[in-house]
Image (spheres, rainbow, N blue to C red):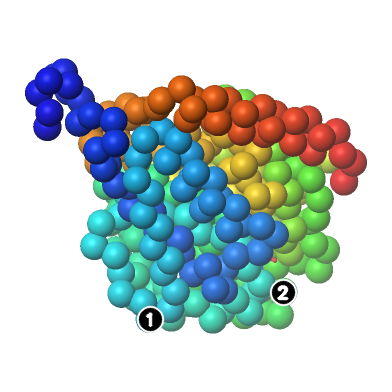
Amino acid sequence: MDEANGAGQAGPLGQSRPIDVVSLYPKDMNIYGDWGNVLTIRRRLKLYGYEPRIHTYNQGDPWPEQVDMVLGGGGQDSGQEKISDDFFKRADTLRALVADDVPMLMICGMYQLFGEYFETIDGTRLDGIGVFGVYTEGREQRMIGNLVEHSDQFGDIIGYENHSGQTFLRDGVEPLGHVEGEGRGNNGEDGTEGARVHNVIGTYMHGSLLPKNPKISDFLIAAAATRRYGEFRPWQEEGQKAELARIDETAANARRVAASRPR
Ligand code: GLN
């Protein structure tokens, strides 16, 4: 620590403050633009003065030593089946990271596998790792379209859903938000969408989600930085501040357009 920089500060501008981000199964679980979530976190981390280290983890890869955030995407039922064995080998590690408050974002197919199980439309049962007290059953009718939901913490969350699985929350499980308008959300019946536990967010929102929802990006980043460095303290020069403001303005425009589009 550089004392001249003031108590509690980790160092001067330019000093490296890595944040290690795991992208979970990007080969098989990455559809409807979910990779955009990784790009968004990488860009925003840099603009806040952190050093993003992205670790892509696919089946059979070594697990990274340091993990500050985990991002998982959606996938076809076949992609979910493909990763299943390897996923179970990592289940204890992932559950320990969840309990240790590592922030995570799990979209659609990975959200389902972070639940108790997903029974696909053809009757195949894929067990999940039980981070969320939710279960999912495949149905004939896919739920497809733009989606707006409201969360007290994040305000309006805007994205796009495309799933055959209907997810049901066990009693007491907190949803990410409540669907507004014609969105279907977890199951098209109870108005809930997604789930929360510790610092983990599960959701059906593709889009990509994070470019259009900077509040969720910043929640994940702040949680990761606080856990690793004791605080979330942006180090920004004027150029970085201006760039972030420009990105947030673009996000605001994208949100307006997406929210106004019919399903
Ligand atoms: N295969 C799952 C379903 O259809 C997940 C789809 C997705 O990730 N978009 O429900």
Q: Does residue 171 appear in this view?
A: no
Disc 2, SS: loop
Q: Residue furthest right?
A: 262
- Between marks 2 and 1, how big is the CA–CA gap? 28 Å
Location of residue 245 with respect to 167 vertically, above or below: above
Location of residue 207 with respect to 76 vertically, above or below: above
- The residue closer to the viewer here, 200 or 238, is 238
Q: Say which residue appears at 41% left-offset and 69% top-offset.
A: 57
Location of residue 19 with respect to 109 vertically, above or below: above
Question: How many discs mark residues in the rendered view?
Answer: 2
Left/right placement of residue 52 relative to residue 230 reads right
Q: How packed is label 2: few (under 14 Cα within 10 Å), some, or many (20 or more)? A: some
- The residue closer to the viewer here, 112 or 20, is 20
Q: Say which residue appears at 49% left-offset and 27% top-offset.
A: 239
Q: Amino acid under label 2?
A: Ile
Q: For the N terminus, which image quadrant?
A: top left
Question: Does label 2 point to a residue whose CB lies under 8 Å from ligand 1?
Answer: no
- The residue closer to the viewer here, 43 or 28, is 43
Q: Amino acid under label 1?
A: Gly
User: Residue 43 location in percent, x, y?
Assistant: 50, 44
Q: Does residue 6 appear in this view?
A: yes
Quarter of the view holding residue 131: bottom left
Q: Are marks 2 and 1 in contact (CB under 8 Å)?
A: no
Left/right placement of residue 129 relative to residue 187 reads left
Disc 1, SS: loop
Pointer 1 residue: 60
Q: How packed is label 1: few (under 14 Cα within 10 Å), some, or many (20 or more)? A: few
Left/right placement of residue 129 relative to residue 157 reads left
Location of residue 48 with respect to 165 vertically, above or below: above
The numbered mark at residue 121 is: 2
